[in-house]
Image (tube, rainbow, N blue to C red):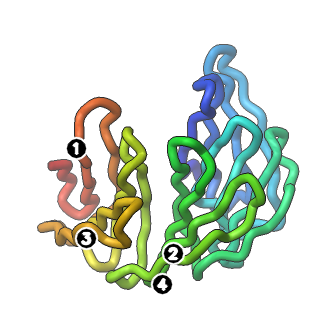
C-alpha cells in the first residue's frame, strides 16, 4: 500500500514507499510514468523516504536501519539506527538526515555525505513517528505518536519545548512553506487544527 512521500529536490519526481510490498515507486510528474524499485531486503516496508539530489533513503523498520539508495534504487549502504525507524526528514542543506524511532526515545542524525550516524539524541517521549524541518531550517518538529505530543527542537538546544496535544494520537503534520505553522492530524477524530 502507498504510504510516505518524498519530492525530489528538482520537483520532477515523487517517490512513494509501498509498505508491505518491499518496494518504492518513482512517479515522473511531467510524463505521468512510474518506475518501481524492488527492495527485497526490506520486509514489511519500506516506510519513511527522503530524496536528495544524488540519492534516496528509506526506513527498514523491522531491521532498525536506513537504506541509502542511488537514484536507480540500487542499495548503496545500510545504516544502523534506533529501534524501528519510522520516518525521515532532511535538513534544508541536505547534509543531515533525521530518522525517528517508533519505539525508543531517540532521534538518529545521519551525515549524508558519508552515510553514517553523526549522533543520537535522547528525547523526552517514548518514541517518535513523523518528522519535518521548518522552512528556515532552524527547527525540527516530531510527532510522538504514543504520547499524543509534538516535540519542537532547535539546532542550538536539544529541546526548546515539549507541547502536549489535546488529541489522542498526534499522527502526521505539515510545516508551511511561508507561514510558521504546524498542522497535526488526528485520525481518531478527523481533525486538523
C-alpha distance separating marks 4 and 1: 27 Å
Location of residue 20 (image quadrant): bottom right
Which SS class for mark 3? strand
The image's mark for residue 104 is 4
The image's mark for residue 1 is none
Q: What residue sits right under mark 3 in the picture?
A: 149
Q: What residue sits right under mark 1 in the picture?
A: 181
Decide: marks 2, 3 in contact (CB < 8 A)? no
Which comes before the other along the chain, label 3 or label 4? 4
Decide: marks 4, 2 in contact (CB < 8 A)? yes
For residue 119, side relative to residue 135 (left or right): right
Q: Residues within 10 Å of mark 1 (few under 14, many from 20)?
A: few
* Residue at 69% over, 65% down: 66
Location of residue 159 (image quadrant): bottom left
Where is residue 42 shown, x and y percent of the image? 75, 66
Front residue of this view, candidates 68 and 59: 68
C-alpha distance separating marks 4 and 2: 5 Å
C-alpha distance separating marks 2 and 3: 14 Å
| Number of marks present in the image shown | 4
C-alpha distance separating marks 1 and 3: 16 Å
Which comes before the other along the chain, label 1 or label 3? 3
* Residue at 52% over, 49% down: 91
Which comes before the other along the chain, label 2 or label 3? 2
Which comes before the other along the chain, label 4 or label 1? 4
C-alpha distance separating marks 1 and 2: 24 Å
**Is residue 177 depicted above or below 163 in this figure?**
above
**Is residue 165 depicted above or below 124 in this figure?**
above
The image's mark for residue 101 is 2
Amino acid at each position: 500500500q502507498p504510504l510516505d512521500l518524498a519530492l525530489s529536490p528538482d520537483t520532477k519526481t515523487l517517490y512513494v514507499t509501498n509498505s508491505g510490498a518491499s518496494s518504492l515507486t518513482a512517479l515522473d510528474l511531467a510524463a505521468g510514468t512510474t518506475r518501481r524499485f524492488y527492495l527485497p531486503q526490506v520486509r514489511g516496508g519500506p516506510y519513511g523516504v527522503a530524496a536528495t539530489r544524488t540519492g534516496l533513503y528509506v526506513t527498514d523498520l523491522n531491521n532498525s536501519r536506513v537504506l541509502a539508495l542511488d537514484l536507480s534504487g540500487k542499495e548503496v549502504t545500510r545504516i544502523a539506527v534506533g529501534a524501528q525507524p519510522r520516518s525521515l526528514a532532511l535538513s534544508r542543506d541536505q547534509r543531515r538526515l533525521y530518522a525517528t524511532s517508533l519505539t525508543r526515545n531517540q532521534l538518529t542524525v545521519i551525515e549524508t555525505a558519508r552515510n553514517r550516524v553523526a549522533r543520537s539524541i535522547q528525547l523526552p517521549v517514548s518514541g517518535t513517528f513523523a518528522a519535518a524541518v521548518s522552512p528556515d531550517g532552524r527547527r525540527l518538529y516530531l510527532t510522538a505518536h504514543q504520547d499524543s505530543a509534538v516535540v519542537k527542537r532547535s539546532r542550538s538546544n536539544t529541546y526548546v519545548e515539549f507541547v502536549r496535544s489535546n488529541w489522542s494520537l498526534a499522527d502526521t503534520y505539515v510545516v508551511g512553506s511561508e507561514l510558521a505553522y504546524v498542522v497535526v492530524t488526528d485520525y481518531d477524530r478527523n481533525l486538523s487544527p
